[in-house]
Amino acid sequence: MIRRSSLHGCTWRFESLADLMAKASPPRSGDQLAGIAAHSASERVAAQMALADLPLSVFLSEAVVPYELCDVTRLIIDGHDSTAFVPIAHLTVGGLRDHLLACDDPGALRQGLTPEMVAAVSKIMRLQDLISVAQRCRVTTAFRNTIGLPGRLSVRLQPNHPTDDAAGIAASTLDGLLLGAGDAVIGINPATDSPQITTRLLHMLDGLIQRHAIPTQSCVLAHVTTTLRCIEEGAPVDLVFQSIGGTEATNASFGVTLSLLREAQQAALSLGRGTVGRNVMYFETGQGSALSANAHHGVDQQTIEARAYAVARAFDPLLVNSVVGFIGPEYLADGKQITRAGLEDHFCGKLLGLPMGVDVCYTNHADADQDDMDALLTLLGAAGVTYVMGVPGADDVMLSYQSTSFHDALYLRAALGLRPAPEFEAWLARMGLDGTTPEALPPGFAQGLLA
């Protein structure tokens, strides 16, 4: 459906809902690379004005990616709760913004919202709007500890090593645990996708967790098919990881389907390894993955990212993580674009009911630096981010990108009065650790970790 908007004596024409959404998006290099971004600030403002006046019901009758071409679209449309939509069915996108800013519990709307509605409203919101709404959306998940409670900030301990060396991984893990990181997950990105190496790392992490009774979960971020094979061979799998996208074609580029993800979820659930909950999936996403796979269908990267959250929430994950600056400056050019995208992703995920973490990060060829990351980290903390990354020295020596360190997470907890997950916090106290300095280590603790 063609839509028009007038501004300063000019009339702008938008050929479809996807075109309107793309033109209304705040500037980012990925949409410019795809040739779908607004050509001027005036066109962008005109598109945002038209989008603000668009009834929410339009999103249920006009798909940005055709229903017949994409199983993610079918998941979104077929799974929409029409009853939950009734209280907001009369609203426009602009009206939804006003409603979200005024209501006490924006997350209560989650079943009535589609990802495209959420993406649309984010495009007409200021950063403070994104923060204000997201910090009132509470999402709690659990496996061996409880994540997402008010006043809590969890940390993924990320002890990656370029050769998957056990001693190097153990040293980084010790560093993180002594500084209060690891309650979200101890998660290793393996240097290869070998089932043998994945199994070895899984046994290593499981031995550490069991030996010291640490109330956390482990994950080796191998491909889902590798993890399934490890489960079949009896490996101690806590969480199943997979990168996902917002279209069927993007997921195909990752080598996954919705049915494969369901199979993996059921396999992990069958192990019964959780002690306080049964959320067994861990997903990572990022703006730009669909464009790099030529799987975006002419839709802007932030809307496609929000559609990935529909995939995630279908599998009740423990953790979802937007690796916001990892894909590169071709998609998010600089610190300003990374900051906006990180807050958008967090807002959209939380509003849709997901336990959102953000990897506050950038690649070395982006026009960004650690000051940008400090600013985004602080804004996300104010927005109620569920968890962030803990990387030794903030420099991932295996993936070759800049992230946040254990000390960055300590800063955020101290600055905003946040604490680890309650079960993990109690473990730190039992071990004589305050989560900031290893002042009272039990005899042999470090040696046991490094054994």
Image: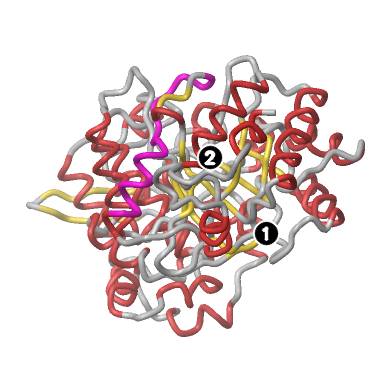
Q: Position of residue 100 (x, y in %)?
A: 34, 73
Task: Give the amino acid type for the residue marked by disc 2 in the picture.
Answer: Leu
Mark 2 surroundings within 10 Å by alpha-carbon count, few (fewer than 14), some (14 through 19), many (20 or more): many
Q: Quadrant of residue 224?
A: top right
Looking at the image, how many numbered discs can be counted on the residues? 2
Q: Is residue 304 visible?
A: no
Task: Give the amino acid type for the residue marked by disc 1 in the picture.
Answer: Phe
Query: CA separation, marks 2 and 1?
Result: 16 Å
Q: Which mark is residue 143?
A: 1
Q: Position of residue 208 (x, y in %)?
A: 70, 40
Q: Nearer the viewer, residue 31 or 218?
A: 218
Q: Position of residue 186 (x, y in %)?
A: 60, 41
Q: How is the image coloured?
A: secondary structure
Q: Nearer the viewer, residue 397 or 83?
A: 397
Q: Which residue is mark 2?
A: 157
Q: Nearer the viewer, residue 139 or 429?
A: 429
As drawn, is 411 to the left or to the right of 65? left
Q: Tell me which segment is drawn in magenta.
A: 398-414
Sequence-first tag of 2 and 1? 1
